[in-house]
Amino acid sequence: MTKDTLGPMETASLADQAYRRLRDAIRGGALRPGEKITERDLAARLGVSPTPIREALRQLVHEKVVERVGPRSLRIADHSAAARSEIVEAEVRLSALMARLAARNATATQLTELVGLLDHADHLVAGIEQTLADQGIDAPVADQVTAVFRLMREFHHQVEACVANPVLEGLLAQARAFSDEERLDLTMKLAPGRADSFRSRYREHRELLDALLERDEDRAEQLAAAHHRAALVQLSTT
């Protein structure tokens, strides 16, 4: 990926397109850690107006992917391995706390919605496994797998919503080591070679749900901590 080519446009809002292309450019090395950037230059390179670039950069600054070093000065964040490890630990601990509080605070309606979400995911997984059994390992199931992973992210977001604490939700959003889309991209790269690992991680969602249904705060916290730590460590070493 060259300096002048940051990837193809997608059928989404201009701000979403700009955000995705900038994330791809950072991940692919077209925008390097420590590199200074400006809205005007990025707008020219992506062929869009400064407004969607400004919105995309606001999100990237929020995610700590881009740093603001002056009123009009930005640069690509250069996180050390130690700093990334600390970010992962913060997310793990906050996610575990949210699971504990969800076991305490979730309403019957919220728990029913979580059950329905996992039931839907189970149905999709069963369909994927049947397709693979019928057509073999090379069967085209990427779209269905993506749908399952999106449901899993929705499950975690709904668990967090059960806490009903906007301050904690905000802290967790700031502490996330990866955005949802970055998680999906990295997970899809890993999925073909680590099927057993992802099956195990998938089943962990049902175990967490059982702990929530039983109002077992300790178990919910322990399961969430182990699940998020394993997932984040795996993604961090990709």
Image (cartoon, rainbow, N blue to C red):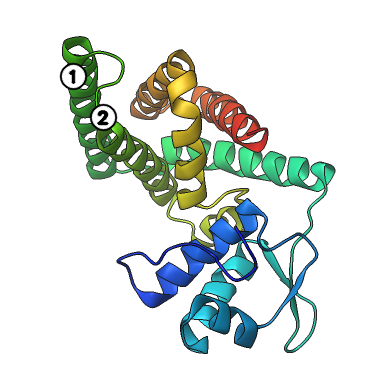
Relative placement, left or right, of 127 versus 59 is: left
Mark 2 Cα within 10 Å, few/some/many (few <14, many 20+)?
some
| x then y, percent, for residue 230 | 60, 26
Residue lying at the far top in this picture: please name it. 133
Q: Secondary structure at mark 2?
A: loop
* Alpha carbon separation for disc pair 1 and 2: 8 Å
Which numbered disc, 1 or 2, marks the residue that appears first in the sequence? 1
Q: Residue at x 75, y 62 (%)?
A: 77
Secondary element at image label 1: helix
The residue under label 1 is 131
* Mark 2 lies on residue: 141
Residue at (39%, 30%) from the top-left corner?
212
Q: Position of residue 64 (x, y in %)?
A: 67, 62
The disc labelled 2 sits on which kind of residue? Answer: Val
Relative placement, left or right, of 80 versus 106 is right
Q: Say above or below: 127 vs 93.
A: above
Residue 193 horizontal/vertical position (percent): 48, 20
Quarter of the image for residue 203 reads top left
Q: Are marks 1 and 2 in contact (CB under 8 Å)?
A: yes
* Residue 164: image tag: none
